[in-house]
Image (cartoon, helix red, strand yellow):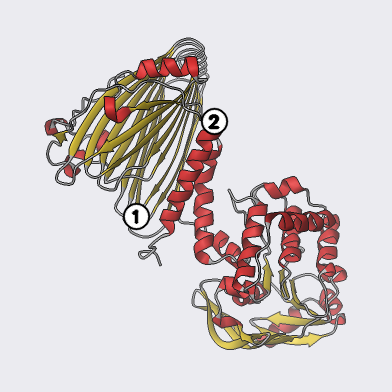
Amino acid sequence: MTLPALDIFDPSSYPTRRDEEWKYSDLSRVLREAPKKAMVVRTLSELEAEPDGFVYFSADEAGFDGLQQAADFAMRKSHGRLYIDGNDFGDEDGYLGYQGRGEINLAAGQELVVFEDYTGAFDYAVHSHLRFALAEGAKLTRVVILDEPESAVSVRQSTIETAPGSVFKQYVFSTGAKFQRFETHVNHAGHGAVVEMNGAYLLKDKRHFDLTTRVNHAEIDGETAQLIKGLVKDTATGVFQGHILVEKGADGTDARMRHQALILNDGAHIRAKPELEIYADDVQCAHGNTIGALDEEALFFSMSRGIPEETARAMLTHAFVLPVADQIEDEVLRETVLNFLENASEGMKEERANAL
Amino acid sequence: MLSIKDLSVAVDTKQILKGLSLDVPAGEVHAIMGPNGAGKSTLGYALAGRPNYEIKGGSVDFNGVDLLDKDVHERAAAGLYLSFQYPLEIPGVPALTFLRTALNAQKKLRGETEMSAPDFLKRVREVAKTLKIDMDMLKRPLNVGFSGGEKKRMEVLQMALLEPKFLILDETDSGLDIDALKVVSDGVNALRSPDRGMLVITHYQRLLDHIKPDRVHVLVAGRIVRSGGPELALELEAHGYDQYLGEAA
């Protein structure tokens, strides 16, 4: 599977609305010129297992160089838990640019939990591409938090290769940015491999988040389950493009895609494009896409029991995205994500000026 | 306790209640009976303050306060409880969390001390036991996947915990089999007290065999057309509402 070549330092490579895959997210419009190359200090931090059981890997200091060593170290020393700290610092006059590639290969039967925590400050533009290759029976869990400043431009792409009996689980949580796109391409080529790709986004103000996933089922008995939940308010835009391809001969495929979003006020947008493309005969595939407003009946019911409107709204919106986090097996990460969602829900409550 | 005077309510510009007057003193249980579309549920919703239920005229006095002037949650804190005909499912919010949030929000508004988690759990356990509600059920999201009977038992649990001064039961018997009806009405009857009023809205007389009213009112086309003692319910069961439909038109 090849991705279109994107070079953050070369504006001629920026996709535009004319590219079908980028119809709802126009990079060339938000980033009119190439960002200045950020000075990156290439010092690899020494690998150590932290008290919480994670091996810490700083992506801002070293790009993704040394990622494989960090992953190997984590699997030897910390029950396979790796924390990638992606903390990009921008400038206050003009965008600073970062671009990085990294790769993790899991050998047969290896298990790894990766927590990717992307934050930053000021104006930066970042493009990264991570590749994860799973050998037979390997298991990778990826928990991603995108907690970026409102001026940030970020495009994070990833490619996943499965093998027979391997398991890939991904959870992405986002509050958006000026422009934020998270892409996952899965080459579902392992007999009986299992893929779960879940996520939740909570967007306010003018923030933009684009979650694009593409799964190619090329082998028999593969499973894909996807649950994406979204909340948008003010003039924020949420984009979900989910594409599942079941190739000829990929019989026994079981693929389910669900996207559920709430628009909390007029002026906020959801662009959803769920697609199933099926060339095999014996498959079970389903997709559901529901976009609506907060359930006013449930709101009234809650208020009639004495809960003030603002509290009831926050309770119901928080509850809406919660099921995604509840599926995370790693307790530390589940708690981290729950905290992130709670803060994000609180943020959605503030300044509800445009509503009503 | 609850005094409704000349209440007119429109829903989506359609006039439903047309000058309804009713007094329910503390300690009494009144039943509202009437045919479909008479405005029975509208009365309950209007009293609870449902959005889009437009008050066109009249007044509602509840223990000396102007009920119509208050927000939905303030009416609840003042002691009004509407039990829904079809209780809503609240996905993602465990019943216990919902109940404690509601109880403490009411207490806070009334200037009372909020209930601590251990005290709250102790109280819930007591009430749940009498209603044959399993504590595990209370850890699940409120009403999600519950049967009709379970939802109604949850309603009674909430009444018992929130201890409202006035209860409006909207078609509480709908969707209940005989056993569930008994558990639910026993729960409601346990809440009868000299300082609590109740308004029981029902289409059928059946519920009134279990929750015996002091007064029965017939609501037709947005107005009370007749009031009487408990015997009026039996008469309606025997003769139907037809005799009133002509009068109201």
Residue in the picture at 45% in, 50% down: A343
Q: Residue at x 68, y 58 (%)?
A: B116
Compared with residue A352, is residue B34 higher up or lower down, i.e. above or below? below
Count up the numbered dots: 2
**Is the residue at mark 2 from the same chain as the one at mark 1?**
yes
- Judge from the rendering whether residue A91 lies leftward or rightward of residue B181; answer left or right: left
Answer with left or right where residue A226 lies relative to residue A117: right
Which of disc 1 and disc 2 is earlier in sequence? 1
Chain ID, mark 2: A
Residue A228 lies, with reference to residue A304, above or below; the image says: above
Q: What residue is disc 1 on?
A: A268
Structural distance between the alpha carbons of marks 2 and 1: 33 Å
- Image coordinates for residue B46, horizontal then vertical, percent: 60, 76
Q: Determine crowd level at label 1: few under 14, some 14-19, many 20+ residues with C-alpha closer than 10 A.
A: many
Task: Name the spot of residue A11 as percent of width and height, x first.
Answer: 13, 34
Does residue B209 appear left or right of residue A119 in this picture? right
User: In the rendered structure, the residue with mark 1 lies on which chain?
Assistant: A
Q: Name the disc covering residue A329, or none.
A: none
State whether residue A65 is above or below residue B249: above
The residue nearer to you, when weighing A347 against B148, is A347
Q: Amino acid at mark 2?
A: Asp
Specify few, some or many for label 2: CA neighbours under 10 Å numbering under 14, 14-19, or 20 or more.
Answer: few
Q: Quadrant of the C terminus of chain B?
A: bottom right
Vertical placement of residue A170 versus A105, above or below? below
Question: Percent position (x, y) of residue B17?
Answer: 60, 81
Residue A117 visible within the image:
yes
**What amino acid is at disc 1?**
Ala
> Quick one: SS at disc 1?
loop
Q: Quadrant of residue B30?
A: bottom right
In what element is the residue under mark 2?
loop
Kindly identify which numbered label has been placed on residue A330.
Answer: 2
